Amino acid sequence: MNAIETQQFDTRSLQQRDSAHYMHPFTDTKALAGRGARIITRGDGIYIWDSEGNKILDGMSGLWCVNVGYGRHELVDAAARQMTQLPFYNSFFNTSVIPAIELAELLTEITPPQFNHFFFTNSGSEGNDTILRMVRRYWDVKGQPQKKTLIARKNAYHGSTVCGASLGGMSYMHEQGDLPIPGIAHIEQPYYFEHGKGMTPEAFALKAAGWLEEKILELGADKVAAFIGEPVQGAGGVIIPPPGYWPEIQRICDKYDVLLICDEVITGFGRLGTWFGHEYFGIKPDLLTFAKGVTSGYIPLGGVAVGDRVANVLIEQGGDFNHGFTYSGHPVACAVAVENIRILQREGIVERVAAETAPYLRRRFTELADHPLVGLAETCGLMAGLVLVKDKATQSVFDPQHEVGMICRGYCFSGGVIMRAVGDRMIIAPPLVITPAQIDEMIGLIRAALDSTLAEVQRRGLL
Ligand code: PXG
C-alpha cells in the first residue's frame, strides 16, 4: 500500500470546514451543512474511495466524464510535462501554442469529415455560449440577421451559464434568474415512456420530430437559426430517442435551412461506442459541443467543432469573431486532451465499448426489468436508465413527493455503487474501461439497492 492509499482523514472536521465556506453547485447549502458532505479522497480505475475508507464503484464516471478511468499516469505526466515547459500562454494576439494546434489536428482526425475547425473553451456551458454567438454571427454574415432563434428541448441540459441554462429545458433552472433569455424556444423531448404510450416507437419518433417542424412553422423558418439537442439526453435522465427520431430531425432542419447542433458533452469520446453520439444515430450536424470526456475530466476543457458550412462563412467572410476566453486553447488542458485521445485510440476503448461492453451492459441491465420496482430498463452504449414504478402491470409511478429515486440513490451509495436519481429514473454511465466482470459486480450492487428500496417502500406503505 502506498502513502495515498493509507492516508487517514478526519471526516467530521472536513465536513464542518466544507459547510463553513464552500458553496456547492446545485446544492441547498443549509441542508448539506446539516447532513455533512461525503468527502471523496481518491480514485483508481472505475472505483473511488471516501474519507471513511469506503470503496465505491463509480457508475457515473465522476459526472459523465472520467471515460478512461481514474489513476492514469499518462495524463498526469502529460500535464506535468506541459506545465514544466509552458504552463500558460494565450491564443489571442496572433500567437498560438503547440498543444492546441495538436489537439485541433487530432480532433479533425477523429470527428466526421465535415469538421475541420475547433474553438476551445473551459467547459460545456461556454461551448454552448460560443455556439449561440457563432450561429447568430453566421446568419448575420450570410445576410439573414433575422434568423436568430435557437430551438432546444424541454428537460435538456446545456449548462449553467445564462445562455446554457436558457438553452436547457430545466424549468427549475429557468425559475431562478429570469431565464430563458430572448430568442430561444423549446419543444417537448422525445421521451417514449411519458409521451409515446400506445404508439409504436417508430410512429412516436415521427411525432416527436414533428414537434420541431411545428415550432419552425409557428416561428417562421426565416426566424429560426438552429436546433440543438443532446444525441441522448444525459442529465435529463438518460432519455434515449426512439429509432428514426434523429434522421427525421435532420430532414426537417435541411428542409427549412436550420443549422443542426449536437451537444456531445456527454455522448462525445466513446460513450455510445462511436467517437461521437451523432454517428451512432447516423446524422450530420453542422456544429458540435464537447467537454467532459475530451480530457476524461482530469482538467477542465470544452469546445466547439465547427462544420465546414459554418466555418467557411465565418473564416472567409466573417473577419474578427469577437469572442474567446483567457483559457481558450489552454496548453496544459490541450496536452492532457491529446494524451487522453491517444489512450482511447491506443487501447481501442471506443471499439471495445461497441463490440463488447455496451452489448453486455444491455444484456445485464435490461435483466433488472424483472425486479418488482422496475417498470422499464434500457441502455444506449454505456448509458443506462431504469424507471421505478409503483405497479409494474399498469406502469403507474410514485408520487414525486415521496422521492423514491432518492431513497434508491441512498441505498446505492451506502451499498457501494454510484447511481444517479433523476426523479424516479435511476441512471448510470460508467467509465468506458469497465470490464464485463465489473458490469456483473455493478448490476449485483444495483439489484441489492433495489431490494433495499423495495423493503423501505413497503415499510413506508407507499405501494
Ligand atoms: N451540455 C451537456 C449535454 C451537459 O451534460 C453541459 C453541457 C455543461 O457542461 P459544463 O462543463 O459547463 O458543466 C453538460 C454538463 C447532471 C449534471 O446532473 C450534468 C452536467 C453538469 C452538471 C450536472 O447530470 N452536464
Image (tube, rainbow, N blue to C red):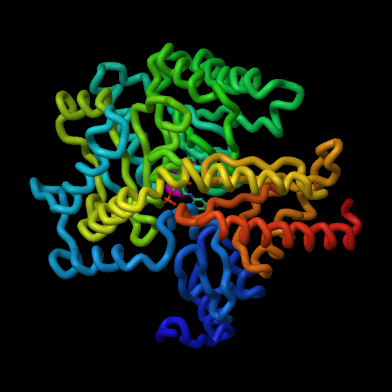
Front-most of residues 131 and 393: 393
Q: Is residue 408 above or below residue 48?
A: above
Front-most of residues 69 and 8: 69
Q: Give the range drawn in magenta.
A: 160-165
Q: In this view, does 442 lie above or below 121?
A: below
Q: Residue at image x 28%, y 33%? A: 306
Quadrant assignment, res 278 = top left
Front-most of residues 48 and 214: 48
Number of residue marks: 0
Q: Residue at image x 51%, y 40%? A: 168
Q: Position of residue 294 (x, y in %)?
A: 35, 50
Quadrant assignment, res 454 = bottom right
Front-most of residues 5 and 287: 5
Q: Where is residue 387 in the image (x, y as percent from the top left)?
A: 71, 45
Left or right of 49 in this view: 112:
left
Q: Does residue 16 appear in this view?
A: yes
The majority secondary structure of the magenta stretch comes to: helix
Toward the left, the furthest residue is: 94
Q: Is residue 48 above or below residue 433?
A: below
Indicate yes or no whether the magenta region holds residue 94: no
Q: Where is residue 280 in the image (x, y as percent from the top left)?
A: 46, 32
Q: Position of residue 248 (x, y in %)?
A: 51, 18
Q: Residue at image x 70%, y 34%? A: 193
